[in-house]
Amino acid sequence: MREWVAPESWTGLVQAQNRIMTKEATQSYAKERARFSHLFSPIMKAVMVDGDAVNRRQYADARKRKRVAVGQLDEAWEKFDLLLAPSAKGEAPSGLGNTGDPLFNRFWTLLGSPCIALPFNTGPFGLPLSVQLIGKHGSDDRLIAWARWIEARLR
């Protein structure tokens, strides 16, 4: 086990992921939005407003940041079998209203990396804590094998 530090340029990736996600949501749902906007949830309406605000330059910059980060992550796979990161900022939220802050998932979602969250303990309120395993793009089977191996050791 060794530490991997994400490149300094990744500091803008959360914003890039948000810009790409919201812009592409407005594009994907354009027809439905034109005819049935009243049926969208308040959260989805806010996503669409954010996507509308992303201009061409911002979108192109976000996609460029993604391409650079994918290349940088490819370099990491030359040294690592998988990466280990927090799944969330703490224990799971109570209730079924939301899944918590997605901050620790945004990089991997943007870069298309397979991820598995493994519960390993509970927090102060008795709710699950978990760790996230990240694998190389296209290595889902290998990541599942690693997850099984790690899960057996977390028990």
Image: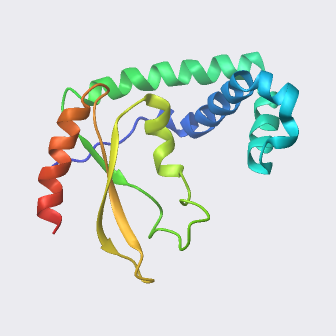
Q: Is residue 29 visible?
A: yes
Number of on-image labels: 0
Q: Quadrant of residue 45?
A: top right
Q: Position of residue 134 (x, y in %)?
A: 31, 41
Residue at (59% x, 61% y) in the render: 98
- Along the viewing direction, whichever of 11 and 77 lies nearer the viewer: 77
Q: Position of residue 79 (x, y in %)?
A: 18, 32
Q: Quadrant of residue 146?
A: top left
In the picture, measured across the screen, residue 95 lies left or right of residue 45, that is: left
In the picture, measured across the screen, residue 82 lies left or right of residue 56, that is: left
Residue at (16% x, 55% y) in the render: 150
Q: Is residue 80 visible?
A: no
Q: Tell me if residue 42 comes above or below residue 12 in the rendering.
A: below
Query: The C terminus appears in which quarter of the rendering?
Result: bottom left
- Along the viewing direction, whichever of 122 and 62 lies nearer the viewer: 122
Q: Tell me if residue 90 comes above or below residue 145 in the rendering.
A: below
Residue at (40% x, 55% y) in the render: 87
In the picture, measured across the screen, residue 102 lies left or right of residue 91, that is: right
Q: Position of residue 85 (x, y in %)?
A: 34, 51
Q: Position of residue 102 (x, y in %)?
A: 53, 51
Q: Tell me if residue 53 comes above or below residue 27 in the rendering.
A: below
Residue at (86% x, 26% y) in the render: 34
Q: Quadrant of residue 131?
A: bottom left
Colour option used: rainbow
In the picture, measured across the screen, residue 14 lies left or right of residue 122, that is: right
